[in-house]
Image (cartoon, rainbow, N blue to C red):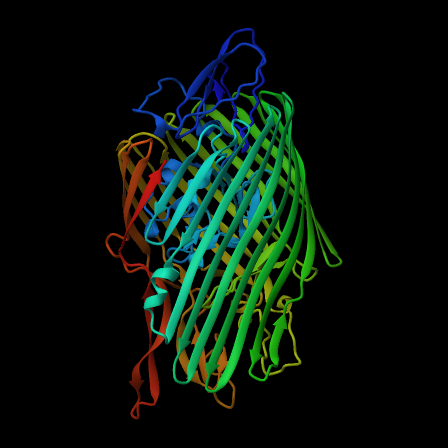
């Protein structure tokens, strides 16, 4: 909301609270606006409490154009590297299998790179997917994906606001190195019941909202469930059975006690379950894989005075991943099992003080109690465990932060603060300061130069597998042996607004990371020598720590509203890593070091009944390590160079780590929406999309396959690199009812 006459602007918090302070004897006009909602204007003349309900544009009979000067320019915000996503645009972008996905849309933004095709993992400015702070209504998610990572956990029908910060995030955020994705659920309707139901190729979903007690207590609930297990499994042969499904449930209840007090309870539960059973004459492979996110958060918002408010929250969460694989080969059965379990209890207290319209002080304290149980084992038919590692680890993380946002003059604004973290595990205590600063120099009303610096620490670490197969990414804590990860990032950029809808940003950044964690070459979560049952290695013995640095430039032209909307984004970046015990200690490019990354998103909406969207993406190929040859061993000693691991009589020789590149990745997607109003305030929407329109054969991964023999007696096998293409051209359709 803003007061144009005195050039004063503010925004409500995630709970809808706001405060504006000013001194004047005149009656002033206050403008309330939000993308996707009809703007309201009211006159104020004294200290007042105003509760405003904005009406969705979908409820308007025809388009309304509001003329006037808009003060909510991107260049007026001191925070840089921040993107606010409109759910209207998110729901218009073409999607894989018709599943609208907020994280897939974020992958189209500058500075955000995807992993494998179709995957929801985000690699932000050189950081890994575990370095992103992902929150929904203050609930922290360790895993944010369904279907092996092809879809995110978040149902777009229940989302209201999406704020994404790529670096130098304010001091109130912590615990991660790369980015913050802060999402807010819809509040629910206070006065009447509404809902939305949809059915697609992959899943169906339902959303309901309405009052429990009119104007006082209200709710929203959304649920999804896939049905691949019901449609595919019955038609598979008995020798190759497979079943997969996922579901998720979002729920939120709000209770407006009075004008100054509000309580909300948010809940999430989601699960993935996969089973497969392959049988042959002398071989069997049975796999069970499931993972589950269960979270809840209770929040009390209290307006203490016109200039002071507070927020207290208590949350609990559990993430659990379990993989079991039973193999029978050459009359020898094996059983493999991995599990990763994290239980958190989180306490937060936040206070916001606004002494003046140009200054805001935000401070608070946070405590997280972690309980980790990472585990893995291999068991032979004789019952002897080749390895077992499942010792729980408890740790405590406490943070104290304060930040101030202010404007010293019409030409200079700032956000300055710091975060002090104390992390204790076993008998070790880490105390880490984290300074944060952002500054903006407003050369004109619509043009600003911005700069920022931030230091972050991360205490929850993910050990990611580098081989193909079921996901075995395990979460582990920093310990007395494993130092917490740290990053320092600085950025410089410009923000230019052409009008209230069109903006342009350009940023350059440099990020330095230390104490990064990865497996040693040839190591995994299990022991090195599976034949020595008396020799055990902990996961801490299997990892190494190193450093990384990333730098680059990002450009984005964004049009938020109008008949034609969308954005064009481009990133030029470098991402390097170096570990003493990997690649002989030499630096190497990270797997997802994409030199060039570009995207174009266009949405054409001539009226409320029809919209057409086009997405085109381009990215330099992933870096990967290839085998160059297979050599014989002499007396057990490998020949052919230092790159590789011996196995029996042969030795695979590899090129230096990540020294080769996959071909460039690019594709074109199309989408269309057809909406029609039916009787009794019911609307139906058809979503039609085509993924990978020109059927580009983008490689999902490469493997080494036998390709004949050589030599006079054909003793020597020849090998050839072959690729797997996962997603050809894929049309999809879904149907929704809005009531």
Q: As drawn, is 278 to the left or to the right of 132?
A: left
Whether residue 592 is visible here, answered yes or no, is: no
Q: As drawn, is 108 to the left or to the right of 696?
A: right
* Figure check: 375 above or below 551: below
Residue at the bottom extreme, as displayed:
713
| Residue at the image position 23 percent from the left and 54 percent from the top | 694
- Residue toward you, 166 or 446: 166
Q: As drawn, is 555 to the left or to the right of 431?
A: left
- Residue toward you, 144 or 717: 144
Occupied quadrant, residue 373: bottom right
Residue at the right extreme, as displayed:
427
* Figure check: 550 above or below 436: below
Question: Which percent across, then down, holds residue 168?
Answer: 55, 40
Whether residue 84 is visible here, answered yes or no, is: yes
Question: Which percent across, then down, holds residue 438?
Answer: 56, 34
Question: Which percent across, then down, holds residue 590?
Answer: 47, 59
- Residue toward you, 512 or 35: 35
| Residue at the image position 49 percent from the left and 45 percent from the top | 250
Question: Which percent across, then down, holds residue 352?
Answer: 63, 29
- In what quadrant of the picture does the C terminus appear? top left
| Residue at the image position 60 percent from the left and 43 percent from the top | 297
Q: How many labels were placed on the picture?
A: 0
């Amino acid at each position: 909301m803003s007061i144009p006459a005195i050039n004063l602007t503010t925004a409500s918090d995630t709970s809808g609270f706001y405060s504006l302070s000013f001194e004047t004897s005149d009656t002033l006009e206050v403008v309330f606006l939000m993308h996707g909602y009809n703007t309201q204007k009211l006159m104020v003349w004294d200290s007042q409490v105003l509760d405003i309900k904005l009406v969705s544009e979908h409820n308007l009979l025809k388009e309304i154009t509001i003329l006037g000067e808009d003060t909510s320019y991107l260049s007026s915000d001191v925070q840089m590297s921040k993107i606010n996503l409109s759910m209207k645009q998110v729901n218009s972008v073409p999607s894989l299998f018709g599943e609208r996905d907020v994280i897939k849309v974020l992958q189209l933004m500058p500075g955000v790179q995807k992993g494998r095709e179709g995957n929801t993992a985000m690699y932000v400015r050189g950081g890994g997917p575990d370095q992103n702070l992902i929150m929904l209504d203050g609930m922290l998610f360790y895993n944010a994906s369904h279907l092996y990572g092809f879809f995110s956990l978040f149902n777009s029908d229940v989302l209201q606001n999406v704020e994404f910060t790529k670096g130098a995030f304010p001091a109130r955020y912590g615990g991660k190195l790369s980015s913050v994705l802060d999402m807010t659920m819809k509040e629910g309707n206070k006065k009447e019941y509404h809902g939305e139901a949809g059915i697609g190729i992959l899943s169906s979903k339902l959303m309901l909202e309405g009052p429990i007690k009119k104007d006082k207590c209200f709710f929203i609930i959304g649920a999804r469930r896939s049905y691949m297990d019901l449609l595919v499994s019955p038609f598979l042969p008995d020798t190759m059975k497979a079943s997969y499904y996922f579901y998720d449930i979002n729920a939120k209840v709000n209770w407006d006690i009075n004008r100054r007090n509000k309580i909300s309870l948010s809940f999430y539960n989601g699960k993935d379950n996969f089973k497969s059973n392959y049988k042959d004459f002398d071989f069997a492979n049975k796999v069970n894989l499931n993972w589950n996110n269960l979270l809840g958060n209770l929040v009390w918002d209290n307006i203490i005075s016109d200039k002071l408010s507070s927020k207290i929250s208590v949350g609990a969460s559990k993430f659990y991943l379990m993989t079991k694989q039973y193999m029978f080969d050459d009359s020898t059965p094996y059983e493999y099992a991995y599990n990763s379990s994290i239980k958190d209890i989180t306490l937060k207290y936040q206070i916001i003080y606004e002494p003046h319209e140009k200054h805001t002080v935000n401070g608070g304290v946070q405590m997280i109690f972690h309980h980790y149980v990472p585990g893995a084992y291999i068991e032979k038919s004789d019952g002897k465990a080749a390895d077992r590692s499942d010792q729980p680890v408890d740790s405590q993380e406490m943070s104290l932060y304060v930040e101030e946002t202010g404007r010293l003059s019409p030409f200079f604004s700032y956000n300055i603060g710091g975060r002090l973290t104390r992390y204790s595990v076993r008998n070790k205590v880490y105390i880490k300061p984290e300074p944060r600063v952002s500054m903006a120099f407003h050369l004109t009303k619509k043009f600003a130069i911005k700069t920022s610096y931030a230091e972050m620490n991360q205490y929850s670490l993910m050990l990611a597998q580098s081989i193909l197969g079921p996901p075995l990414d395990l979460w582990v804590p920093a310990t007395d042996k494993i130092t917490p990860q740290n990053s320092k990032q600085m950025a410089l950029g410009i923000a230019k607004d052409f009008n209230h809808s069109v903006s342009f940003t350009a940023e350059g950044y440099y990020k330095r990371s230390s104490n990064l964690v990865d497996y040693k070459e040839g190591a995994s979560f299990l022991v090195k020598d599976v034949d020595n049952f008396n020799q055990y290695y902990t996961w801490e013995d299997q990892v190494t720590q190193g450093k990384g640095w990333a730098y680059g430039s990002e450009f984005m032209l964004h049009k938020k509203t109008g008949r034609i909307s969308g954005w064009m984004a481009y990133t030029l970046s470098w991402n390097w890593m170096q570990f003493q015990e990997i690649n002989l200690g030499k630096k190497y490019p990270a797997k997802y070091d994409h030199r060039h990354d570009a995207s174009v998103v266009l949405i054409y909406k001539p009226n409320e009944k029809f919209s057409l969207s086009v997405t085109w993406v381009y990215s330099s190929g992933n870096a990967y390590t290839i085998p160059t040859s297979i050599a014989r061993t002499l007396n057990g000693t490998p020949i052919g160079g230092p790159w590789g691991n011996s196995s029996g009589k042969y030795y695979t020789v590899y090129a230096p780590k990540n020294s080769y590149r996959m071909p460039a990745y690019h594709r074109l997607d199309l989408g269309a929406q057809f909406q029609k109003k039916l009787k009794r305030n019911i609307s139906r929407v058809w979503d039609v999309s085509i993924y990978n329109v020109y059927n580009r054969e983008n490689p999902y991964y490469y493997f080494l396959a036998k390709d004949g023999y050589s030599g006079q007696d054909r003793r020597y096998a020849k090998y050839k690199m072959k690729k797997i293409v996962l997603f050809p051209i894929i049309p999809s359709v879904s149907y929704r009812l809005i009531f």
